[in-house]
Image (spheres, rainbow, N blue to C red):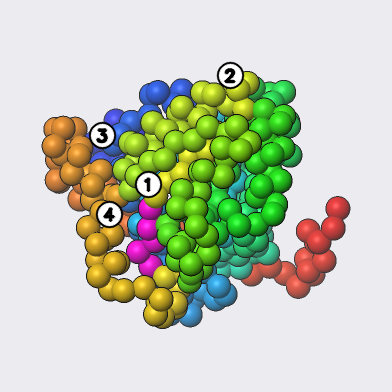
Amino acid sequence: MWRRCQETASQFWEWEYRFVVDATTVSYRDMLQRMWLIRSFEERVIELCHKKDLAGLVHVGIGQEGVAVGIASSLADGDYLYGTHRSHGHFLAGGADPNRLLAELAGKETGYCRGRGGSMHIVDTDNRLMTATGIVGGTISLALGTALVAQEEGAVVAVYFGDGASNTGGFHECLNMAALWKLPVVLVCENNGYAEFTPLSAHTNVSNVSDHGKPYGIPSRIVDGNDVLGVLDAARFAVKRARAGKGPTMVECKTYRLRGHYVGDPETYRQADEVAEWRDKDPIRRFGEHLTDQKMVTQDDIEDMRAAAQTKIDEAVRFMAESPWPSPDSMTECVYA
């Protein structure tokens, strides 16, 4: 997480990566700063893709920063987090280094997986950001395995999945097992209304994904995913239950991705007025307005945060560009144990 240091005239923010040891101490200003970092990172990723500096299938979560920061801010040092195919924001909120993350997207040796994983397969074990995967709902079963270890450690595992994952058999098998063994898992549904290009109403009659937890006795909280404080409150409830040995909780975050399913998506499956309606609910703007209303920040503070985030991403782009490609001699490394 970001730690706010003393302000100076020359530098508004200095940052250090770490998990928050006591989630109750998380600073709202820090949360807003991290949301700006995620937005700046993903906007730059889109630019780099269009310039062909990044290749491959890349998914961004612009508009969903409130979920990423709200969930990560509820976790403590030693907790675990699993992402999805759209996890840049999840992992940046959890302490990932934007330099190494961008280098990974570019296939460089200095990336988190030495350039082997790309955008959809990110691992940062130093921060217990375990993995992301392109398989729909694929990390939930992995998270349950980690939860068996976490149970002995007194730790908690948070795992993300989308609304589309709720229609897979593995999803229901995982709910059953998590409930049966009272695993310390926070099941985070990032419900943005679309499974790739298909609206929720076209692939299920269940409007609230969290309802799937009821037959297994899994309690849930449904929150506005664009309200970062609402997400944080629900996540703290779920984390507290998990740490107390009461088992899994589902947190369903109703949110929206303001960009397509992937960079370059023509987005013919949704209407412009729908996107415009959700753009008005932008989680960064809403949180910034809340903090200014509460006299916790000024508009100048917010502009400084945005500029600081962009500077951080400028550094990441330079790091990416200057990083070496993997050597052909290393081709067979990291293939098998």
State the image quarter where residue 148 is shown.
Answer: top right
Q: Please indicate whether residue 267 sits to the left or right of residue 331 in the image.
A: left
For the point 56% across and 37% down, the residue is 214
| Image quadrant containing the N terminus | top left
Label disc, if present, on residue 225 of the rendered structure: 1
For mark 1, give the secondary structure.
Answer: loop
Query: Upstream in the sequence, badge 3 or badge 2?
Result: 3
- Residue at 81% x, 61% y is 335
Where residue 144 appears, as percent x and y from the top left, is 69, 39
**Residue neighbourhood size for the residue with mark 1, other residues' Cα within 10 Å, grouped as few (<14), some (14–19), many (≥20):** many
Query: For the residues carrying marks 1 and 4, which lies nearer the camera in this image?
Result: 1
Mark 4 packing: few (<14 Cα in 10 Å), some, or many (20+)? many
96 in relation to 184, above or below:
below
| Helix, strand or loop at mark 3 | loop
Residue 172 higher or lower than 313, as above or below: above
> Callout 2, which amino acid?
Ala
Q: Give the secondary structure at mark 2.
A: loop
Q: Amino acid at mark 4?
A: Asp
Mark 2, Cα crowd under 10 Å, few <14 / some 14-19 / many 20+, is: few
Residue hosting label 2: 244
Residue situated in front as seen by the camera: 235 or 221: 221
* Marked residue nearer the N-terminal end (4 or 3): 3
Residue 131 locus on image (x, y percent): 64, 50
